[in-house]
Amino acid sequence: MRHAVTVAELEHWRENGAGWRLLELTDSRVEVELCTCYGEPVDRLESGDPTVIAFLRDQPAEPA
């Protein structure tokens, strides 16, 4: 079972030069793919936390 992604984890990931891709975003669930600074996928995480969902709704799209 994967752990649920947190806002702190996403911020830490970005502060260290990496990023993420938003794979799914609904009113009740989010799924993101954590990526290296080169864009290579590392892990896929999800959450149903409304705080995480709201945080990701407010984020600019990651570059392709």
Image: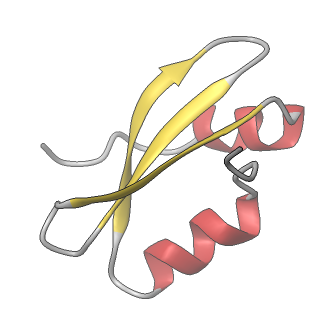
In the drawing, does residue 41 fall left or right of residue 48?
Answer: left
Colour mode of the rendering:
secondary structure
* Occupied quadrant, residue 23: top left
Pick out the residue farthest to the top: 27
Pick out the residue farthest to the front: 1
In the drawing, does residue 17 fall left or right of residue 1?
Answer: left
Instruction: Answer above or below: position of 26 versus 35.
Output: above
Pick out the residue farthest to the right: 50
In the drawing, does residue 21 fall left or right of residue 14?
Answer: left
Residue 20 at x, y percent in the picture: 39, 53
Instruction: Answer above or below: position of 27 versus 7.
Output: above
Residue at 76 percent across and 43 percent down: it is 52
Pick whichever, 34 or 16, lies toward us. Answer: 34
User: In which quadrant of the rendered image does the N terminus lie?
Assistant: top right
Residue 64 at x, y percent in the picture: 12, 43
Residue at 42 percent across and 88 percent down: it is 16
Residue at 48 percent across and 83 percent down: it is 15
Residue at 18 percent across and 48 percent down: it is 63
Instruction: Answer above or below: position of 37 versus 33.
Output: below
Residue 53 at x, y percent in the picture: 72, 33
Residue 58 at x, y percent in the picture: 60, 39
